[in-house]
Image (cartoon, rainbow, N blue to C red):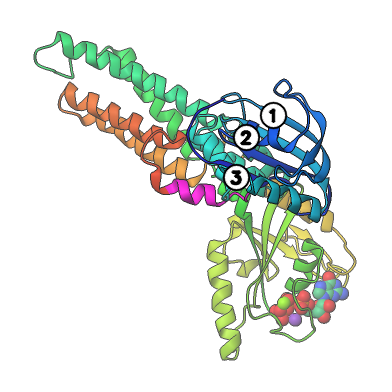
Amino acid sequence: MTGTGRDTIYALSSGSPPAAVAIVRISGPAALVALQQLTDIAPALPRHARLATLRHPVGGEALDRALVLHFTGPDSATGEDVAELHLHGGRAVIASVLAALCSIDGLRPAEAGEFTRRSFENGRVDLAEAEGLADLLLAETESQRRAALALAGGSVSHLVEDWQRRVLALAADVEACLDFSDEGDVAEGLPSSWHEELARLAEEMGSLLSRPAIERLRDGLRVSIAGPPNAGKSSLLNALAGREAAIISDIAGTTRDLIEAPTAIGGAPFLLIDTAGLRDGADEIEAIGISRTRLSLEQADIILWLGAPCDCPDPPRSIIVQAKADLNPRIDARADIRVSAVTGQNMGKLIELLIARAEGLLPKEGEVAINARHQAAIQEARSFLDDTKSAPDLLIVAESLRLCRVALDKVTGRAGVEDMLDALFGRFCIGK
Ligand SMILES: Nc1nc2c(ncn2[C@@H]2O[C@H](COP(=O)(O)OP(=O)(O)OP(=O)(O)O)[C@@H](O)[C@H]2O)c(=O)[nH]1
Ligand SMILES: [K+]
Ligand SMILES: [Mg+2]
């Protein structure tokens, strides 16, 4: 048992009832006592599931027949003693068991993310891994799930720990030099291999920083569908999104606001954006819509351009689409693709083009992907490495390397992250 002297918390950790099974988790110093008070069977080995009748600890009334198991700290998810009750997943069953737990001394309902917060505080997961868990719970596409699982499994943490070790080794060399030199002169003492290793580290950090951030997987790639009025933009959005997200009509100027449809295509996340048709002489409201279209074009990762190829606002970012192919037999050689939202002609090819573009803009499968918070910390760490180059003496070099490690510590949560802990753990639901 871990005698942390803190509250024991409990919560429904599975999804909303009714369901076949509901899992209630209890974590803290009183978890095993609570389990003992609820069940009528002798304590068993940790990690061994048993069937038990759960009874109210005061009235003795039978509440459910449940599978129960426990884990002893620190070898548990939270690092504390943990008990799990696998109940029948009906609302009344869950409510009666939660009420019974509430009647036990030292137990209270958990707050959002509190189980994971305890894992972090007890060193079971570091901050980057906890962020990965948060992402995993919210993952909606295959690519999000993969990136979150890698982060939760320590992909970023391991990389950063490797850098930490190497920066520490460089610092040790500097310390050794300082011990042997009176002057602290940078020019003497440090071998070229030291400088090479420093350059290699800076380069490794730089190449990770140049890759797309994990948020792109969460927010989706922004695809603006633009062109003149009545080009068939809203029809194309609906065909790609697979639902009637935007109003379609034969009246030019139907769409005025931006219409966003988050859509997973080929396991990759896209934010499809329908826009007001671009034209001169629009009325006041449509003109506002058109200015929103222009803003959306600036922010787009990919533009599906349904206008004349020569009017395309940014060809490198664009896929030039000749729409309404069923009506228009004339093939424009400057278009990347001819499609019909009505007959479905070439829609599969358009999807392939989108997926191909996405590959260059999203973290790749198996690639270590970092989030914006990691980017900021690694950026800072690298700038301290750069500082060593212009450092006037070895004491400053040693200090820059120390600051570099402090910056890297932020990734795994060993330093300077107090302000973001509440924000992170608040992203979890109750029971996680
Ligand atoms: N035959 C055919 N008609 C289409 C196709 N795509 C769109 N249309 C028709 O073209 C008209 C305009 O389509 P919308 O999708 O509203 O065009 P839009 O570009 O969104 O128009 P605004 O929002 O007004 O700028 C509608 O009557 C659609 O039914 C297509 O692929 N084939
Ligand atoms: K229209
Ligand atoms: Mg429209």
Question: Where is mark 3, residue-wise?
Answer: 134
Q: Is residue 336 above or below residue 431?
A: below
| Residue 33 located left or right of residue 48 | left
Residue type at mark 1?
A: His
How far apart are the two marked residues, 2 and 3, measured between alpha carbons? 25 Å
Question: At 84% from the left edge and 45% from the top edge, which residue is drawn?
Answer: 88
Question: Where is mark 1, residue-wise?
Answer: 70
- Mark 3 or 1, nearer chain start: 1
Q: Nearer the viewer, residue 430 or 229?
A: 430
CB atoms at circles 1 and 2 under 8 Å apart?
Answer: yes
**In the image, which residues are magenta?**
420-432
Categorize mark 1 by other alpha carbons within 10 Å: few (<14), some (14-19), many (20+). many
Q: Report the disc number at residue 31.
A: 2
Q: Nearer the viewer, residue 172 or 330?
A: 172
Residue type at mark 2?
A: Ala
Q: Quadrant of ligand 2?
A: bottom right
Q: On the image, which quarter does residue 104 sit in?
A: top right
| Residue 313 located left or right of residue 328 | left
